[in-house]
Image: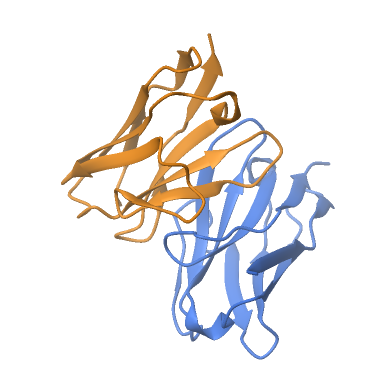
Chain colours: A blue, B orange
Amino acid sequence: EVQLVETGGGLVQPGRSLKLSCVASGFTFNNYWMSWTRQAPGKGLEWVASITNSGGSTYYPDSVKGRFTISRDNAQNTLYLQMNSLRSEDTATYYCTREGVMDAWGQGASVTVSS
Amino acid sequence: DIQMTQSPPSLSASLGDKVTITCQASQNINKYIAWYQQKPGKAPRLLIRYTSTLESGTPSRFSGSGSGRDYSFSISNVESEDIASYYCLQYVNLNTFGAGTKLELK
């Protein structure tokens, strides 16, 4: 069974940093691109970052480019999202997802940016 | 960047109705569109990929069609368990979601 489990969410002050982790199981992690997608409270879904299966290339929308960094450790079957210079508008549930088609989702990690 | 225009934002239906949601891409996405169902407090669930391919476990009352820039998603014979929000996603060039459609019971 494919499983994605996110950890690392919490309350953080504006301008500070936070790092999310996602541990994958039930599939061959290093065969798949992985992504992060977020959902602000009461809002729609927004793609946040993607990384190729080798980790050699990463992609971001303009809303987080330069502030967020996606990375992976294929030996540990773990995906990461380093979030710097956090803003109130980054408050959301962050989901770890598999492949461009996002055929598997974690349960989500809640991030609240507030003073 | 590819934009996805999803409509309507909300939909009210009676049990047994057929409902249709549309997504228009800002450019040809070559059928690389997926549809998701999300219930409150839960992660989205992939229902359909590549325009019309149903995922394992997706009931046959769900369907998708389209080509080029224009795509649609339908639920025939709406059931109470279908009350949820629905999103389209293009995945031909990175990812862009539609704004979502909230399906409610009339």
Residue drawn 48% across the image and 47% down it: B58
**Is A8 placed left or right of B52 in the picture?**
right
Residue A79 higher or lower than B40, as above or below: below
Residue A72 higher or lower than B25, as above or below: below
Q: Position of residue A58 (x, y in %)?
A: 46, 73
Q: Position of residue B28 (x, y in %)?
A: 17, 50
Outermost residue to the top: B106
Q: Is residue B101 visible?
A: yes
Residue drawn 41% across the image and 35% down it: B61
Q: Is residue A14 visible?
A: no
Q: Position of residue B96 (x, y in %)?
A: 39, 49
Q: Residue B57 or A91: which is nearer the viewer?
A: B57
**Is B7 placed left or right of B40 in the picture?**
left
Residue B62 higher or lower than A65, as above or below: above
- Write down the quadrant of residue A67 in the picture: bottom right
Residue drawn 57% across the image and 26% down it: B83
Q: Position of residue B31 (x, y in %)?
A: 24, 52
**Is B67 placed left or right of B23 in the picture?**
left
Which part of the image, by quadrant, shows the C terminus of chain A? top right
Q: Residue B6 or B14: which is nearer the viewer?
A: B14
Q: Residue B91 or A12: which is nearer the viewer?
A: B91
